Each structure stands twice: as structure tokens, then as C-alpha cells.
Amino acid sequence: MENETEAPGRPLTVGQALDCCHRQLQESDLCYGHGTDNAWDEAVQLVLAAAELPPDADDGVLPHPLDEASFRRLQTLLAGRIRQRVPAPYLLGRAWFAGLEFLCDRRAIIPRSPIAELILNGFRPWYAGPEPKRILDLCCGGGCIGLAAAHYYPDAAVDLVDIDPDALQLLCERVEGNLLAAVQEVEKLKLLAPDGRIGCATVTDAVSDNARFNLFDMTDRALSGDASGSLRMLHGLRGEGSEPAVVLWALAREIRTLHQVQLDCEGGQAVQQALAAHRVWKSRTGLMETALARHDGASLSRLLAQAARVDGSIKGFADGRPWDHLEDLVVGLAQPAS
């Protein structure tokens, strides 16, 4: 849609309104990116909406008269956009994604993602196999990606699942970059969260596999300084058939984080800042600070060396029994540094 020369005074046609709206948007210091990337395209959306014309109208509507009611609607839209900085999709109540129109309000993020182009192009160049039979929109938010996928791939089973940030981090730590494991965990989580909302409790239930003795509870007790409680849970995990390598992974991960944070603190960084830099959840900072109060860099280095000995005994190139070494590691983490 091309510009039309504006007449003086109130715009009398759609074309004049476009020029007027475009000029006001350009003179403001607005940012774009919610469906448009420039002032002209946004002016087109606002004017067509105010004039109650189709959003895909062409140049043929430029001479269309702009009545007083349409002009007032446009003034209201411009005030919301320029003075209040409200994104245009929230003002209009609609947004477009992958060629589809979505209802849009402040309850959800405005639909926008480069994945729209992938959906429209058969997921090329990142996927060149047969048409997908199953599609997962994880962290779906408003659901635009999953809904668009369902529209363009009607024969595929499409799941939309939301997950909160802490739960997502826990899941990522659990699978450690293993995509097959991630798929398996998500399948399990879908069953545990029939409402489609995954929280930390859901992930923890999946990770613990309904075990009576929870691996993460054991490490938390050790971090808190509860040597007897953490040992009891370690024995319970052994009795339930847990693999020593998995137990070592959980303990070593916490010890490595403590060691890195301690080094940062010795370098002059504040504890809270160091914990945040190493992506420790806010809900766990108290536990980590408690453990840091008991240990220094030297004691944590010794614990890392102990963890290496446990790993060696599990793999058969170091002396001792893995579970005995794990007991020493748990006690060493829970007790004050000697």
C-alpha cells in the first residue's frame, strides 16, 4: 500500500490518515518488532483497524472516506501506542503468526518467533525427513507455535506443554544435553501433568521415579549439614537399587558448583552474585550458603578429589567399594571442614 498526499486539517480519506499516522509514529521514539518492523507497516495496521477495513486491504481503499467515528478510533489507538507505549497487537486485540490470525491481549506474550518460517517451509533447512508425525511445543506460552503446527500439519499429533523456568532448568540438568533422554523425560512429564503445566514438583516426581528415597533430598540434606539424615537416605537409595554413578553425579555437581562459587568469593565477588552467576536457583541459595559457611576452597578441592576416587572405583581402576567411598563423600560434604 503506497502513500497518498495528505490534505491539510483532519484526514478525510484512508490514504490521508495513513500519511498522518505514519508521520506521528515516525516522530515518536517507538520501537517495533511485534509483527511489524517499521512505522509505515504499523500505521497500515492501525488505520485499517480504525476504519474497520480488512487487514489485507490493498491500495483500492486509499480514497475510502474516513468518517468521524473512524478518526476518533484512530486517535485513541495512536494515544495508546505513542503515549502509553502499548504494543499494537494489544491495542488491536489480534496478531498474526505464520499467516494465521490470533486473538491477543496482555495475558499472553505477543506471538512472534522465527519458527513461523520453519513451519511454513517444512522445517527446512534443519529437517529434511518425512512429514513429522509428532510435534511438541515445549514452553508453549500462548501456544502460537503449536497451534500453527497443528494447522499446517493436520495429520501430526501436536502437544502444547508449558513449563516454569525452575522446572526447565531442573530438566536440563537432569538430561545433561542428551536429546533422547530429554524426549523420554518430556513424554513422562506429559503424563504427570495432564493440565499441560509442568512445575518443579512435576519434574522432581519424574526424576525420583516415585522412589521412597529421593536423590535430590539426599544431596540437600548433605548441603544443610545433616550427616545422619543424608547417610540414611544414601543407604535407602542403595537398597532400592540406585546406580552409584547416578548418586555420584548428583553429589559431584553440587560440589563443583560450591567450589566454583568459593573461588569467585575468594576473588572478591559477593556470595549472592557468585551464586547467581553460576545459575543457582534462588530457592537453593540458602542451602548453598550454609554449605559454603562450613567449607573453604581447600576442603572443597579435597571433596572433588574424593569424588574422582569414587568415579575410579565405579569404573574399576581405583581401590575400594563405590558405596563406601560415597558414604565418605556424603559425610565430608555434610560435616565442617577439618
Image: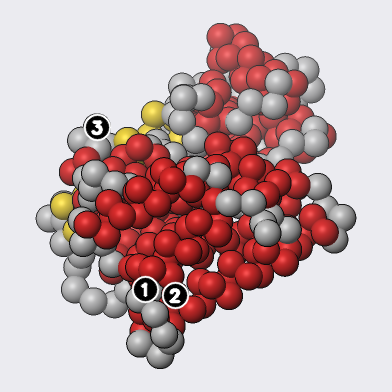
Check disc 3: other Cα within 10 Å, few if <14, some if 14-19, many if 20+. few
* Residue ranking furthest to the right: 268
The residue identified by callout 1 is 322
Residue 268 found in image quarter: bottom right
On the image, the x and y values in percent for residue 21 come to 69, 29
Check disc 1: other Cα within 10 Å, few if <14, some if 14-19, many if 20+. many
Residue kind at label 1, given as amino acid type: Pro
9 lies above or below 179: above
Indicate the secondary structure of the residue bearing disc 3.
Answer: loop
Residue 319 found in image quarter: bottom left
Name which residue lies at 35% across and 68% down.
323
Depth check, front residue: 196 or 37: 196
Residue 62 visible in the current orientation: no
C-alpha span from label 3 to label 2? 41 Å
On the image, the x and y values in percent for residue 151 come to 24, 48
The residue identified by callout 2 is 310
Q: Quadrant of the C terminus?
A: bottom right
C-alpha span from label 3 to label 1? 41 Å
